[in-house]
Amino acid sequence: MAIADQNTLRGRDTECATFDRLFDAVRGGESRALVVRGEPGVGKTALLDYAIGAAPDLGVLRAVGVESETELPFASLQHLCAPMLDRLERLPAPQHDALRVAFGLSGGDAPDRFLVGLAALSLLSDVAEERPLLCALDDAQWLDEASALALAFVARRLLAEPLALVFVTREPIDALSGLPELVLEGVGDDDAGVLLDSAIPGPLDERVRETIIAETRGNPLALLELPRALTPAELAGGFALPGAPLTDRIEQSFLRRAQSLPPDSQRLLLTAAAEPLGDVTLLWRASERLRVGPDAVWPAEAAGLIEVGARVRFRHPLVRSAIYRAAAPPDRWEAHRALAEATDLEADPDRRAWHRAQAAAGLDEAVAGELERSADRARRRGGVAAMAAFLERAAELTPDPGRRGARALAAAQAKLDAGAPEAAQALLATAGLAPLDELQRARMQRLRAQIAFALRRGSDAPALLLDAATRLVPLDPGLARETCLEALAAAIFAGRLGNGRDVLRVVRATPPGQLPAAPDLLLNGLATLVTQSYAAAVAPLRAALEAFRRDDGPSPAKDRWLWLACRVAADLWEHEIWEELAASGVRRARETGALSIFPISASYRAGVHVHAGEYAEASALLEEAYAVAQATHTALLVQARQMVAAWRGNEAKALELIEAGRLDATARGQGMALSMIECANAVLFNGLGRYEEALAPAQRACTQDDLSLYALALVELIEAAVRSNRPELAATALERLSERTRASGTDWALGIEARSRALMTDSPSAEPFYEEAVERLARGRLAPHLARAQLVYGEWLRRENRRLDAREQLRAAYDTFSRIGAEGFAERTRRELSATGETARKRSDETRAVLTPQEAQIARLARDGLSNPEIGAQLFISPRTVQYHLRKVFQKLQITSRNQLGRVPAGGLTSS
């Protein structure tokens, strides 16, 4: 490891070995992601240079984050991907189009920002197929937000690509949280002494030597740079380092060296520091406008501050920051003005606008207007964070107070859309100082309510949104109705639907048709639910669901509210419509690569699988949704995981998930989530036959009569109360349940009511209800509900001493529970069968499927004829990762090719 012995890497053998192991893994076909973090000057860039030099057999892509680039969307990602853009045509069409729009290579609708990440993953995977690849991102703390999120997504979806993704950063980055991390500290005293001696050619007072080593804390750059700034007298003795932070001291060392250069060299350094691309041609064009000739670069290179070759590169990122920050404002304005004039307006209008903005010394409407146009281009590319930054700076430069307020309001909305509610709140304060018109004031009130919901998800948000909707009624009826729908959605999250009179006031005062048909009908139905009753709301809500079913084309409005339509379908006991809508949401997310809507769509689709008894499919979807939600920091209906575990009857796992979910939902004030979690808790204990323990969570699940699977919670309460000898409690719950089931009228609803009524009925008049429950529930894909009806029917028959009839029902229930993996209910049924004198064999571990949920899903798609790239596009992974999983599937199923998957029994392609 000769390279590691150089002064720049002295004391870094352990860290170098970490990179050596990383490269060995990549050469072996594995993926790795690593975040290298440490204070400025600690040796991060030197370690990265070592990594690149130590792996000459790997392809290398390198990009550097730059502070002034942080507001330009996908700037760093485009820099990294630039050498690969000739491969764009190999990508699936949605990914290809998304990347072209994001990079400004073509027009089009703003792409899902995580689809851009998926496209980058596919592009990198394609390159890595030909040669193992290292992607290095230095100064990652300055990555623009869009690039950081896209690259973090790539890092989290890597698995079987021969690819290493290394981020080098001074400080933690939220988007990269959870990735493997290597934290660099200062080197030890012995190595620090060697580094210090190498920087000072003559003798050094020992006390000064010890002081420098102690106060630099082993920071290699400080040890090498600080002595250059000391006078001979200071080196001889009596030296004490100033009390500034270490970064400031290092920057001061570089700055003193820069300030000793001729004025033209200083102007050239400042211009290079203000120009983040390292574009040599652009630097020379700007220098000409400053009347600085090419000769000015030689003193700067001789001082070891900059290298000008194919690209402009500073010796260390701190050189750039020291020069830029120390420059007088007029000098910075002059450099940015020259760079703006040198930037091609047609080729790079946004960078030109940004340089002009940095050059503005005061209010300037022309520059503000240019920034506003850049904001619109950023919006079309999906760079919401950049759009917000352009608008914020435009507001700062706007002379007219009214226009300044409008731009600040637009910037606040963009900040919220970009996931920065605190920044949006600050911009609202700026907008509030401006002379806004009444509509703008109403929009500001709406935005303030949206920020409250984003920050707290609390119970105050619905009322705030309804107030804003009321104010918007005479000003913008369409926006008023949309805000009212937002208020209802927020109320559902909070578990309380709010003030019906306020909802009614908005809906009656605004004519229908202001929104797209499906969301507009959904608002009418929910308003009826809030202001009248469940029974009255069934017809208008069904009309809304039909509109969602008919509107099968791409529609942002439909995508936004599809989750709520699924929620309504579940509460109306419309299993088929629920399945159809949830499946269309997942399908659209897969086809278009809309990763931001995939987790919530997949959560509701998993809920359909739960009620069909398809727990393997539900688990596969939830595992995928959870991985995508982590990678994209998007919402996930995590309560579905608790419900799967509860139905499966794994008490330890279910209780662990339930307790974690309860704590999180309580902290967030999410009443709907709490109801679902408590319902899962009741399902678990009813399945285990521990009815007293099921009673309390069932009661808690029924405390809020909202869109939160309230009726299914009543079902659990009825069974727990009957078995716990609480007939009055059960009777009240049955009355509330029947109000909903009879209004719904579906076989699922009426079958559930019949089963619950049978539990409450004295013999022998209970039997018709049991028979009705079995008959109705057998008509749909409702295996666990049918099996539960057969179980309680069998239990009743045994108590009636009709053992042969009981065995028939109990065998059917046991076979279903065993087949679908509802092991708590299966064991309860087995005990009941034993009481009839029949022995049922327990399901053995050997009969369990061996595939993981993702392996099973990939195997099914491969069996259906999809290619690896097609499967990868659907599951948001690379084709190589698909092949990696298929190899494991073949090994586990003892087959050798995908053609043999069609001969594997259906049960062999499910997961445990």
Image (tube, rainbow, N blue to C red):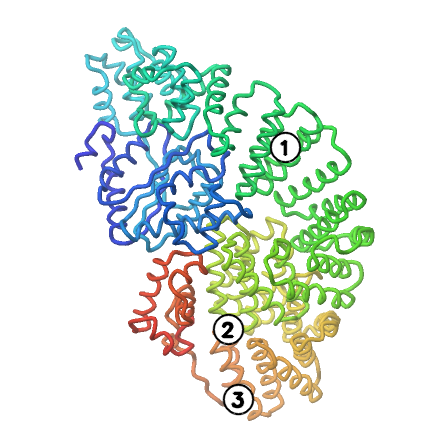
Q: Earlier in the sequence, mark 1 or mark 2?
A: 1
Q: Closer to the camera, 507 or 624?
A: 507
> Which class describes the residues within 10 Å of circle 2: few (<14), some (14-19), or many (20+)?
many
Residue assigned mark 2: 824
Q: Secondary structure at mark 1?
A: helix
Q: Quadrant of residue 4?
A: top left
- Number of marks drawn: 3
At 46% from the left edge and 47% from the top edge, which residue is drawn?
99
Q: Earlier in the sequence, mark 2 or mark 3?
A: 2
Q: Quadrant of residue 5?
A: top left
Which of the labelled discs sits on residue 500, or is there none?
none
Question: Are circles 1 and 2 on residues that touch, CB within 8 Å?
Answer: no
State the CA–CA distance, disc 3 to disc 1.
Answer: 72 Å
Q: Position of residue 133 (x, y in %)?
A: 30, 46
Q: Position of residue 291 (x, y in %)?
A: 41, 14
State the CA–CA distance, disc 1 to disc 2.
Answer: 54 Å
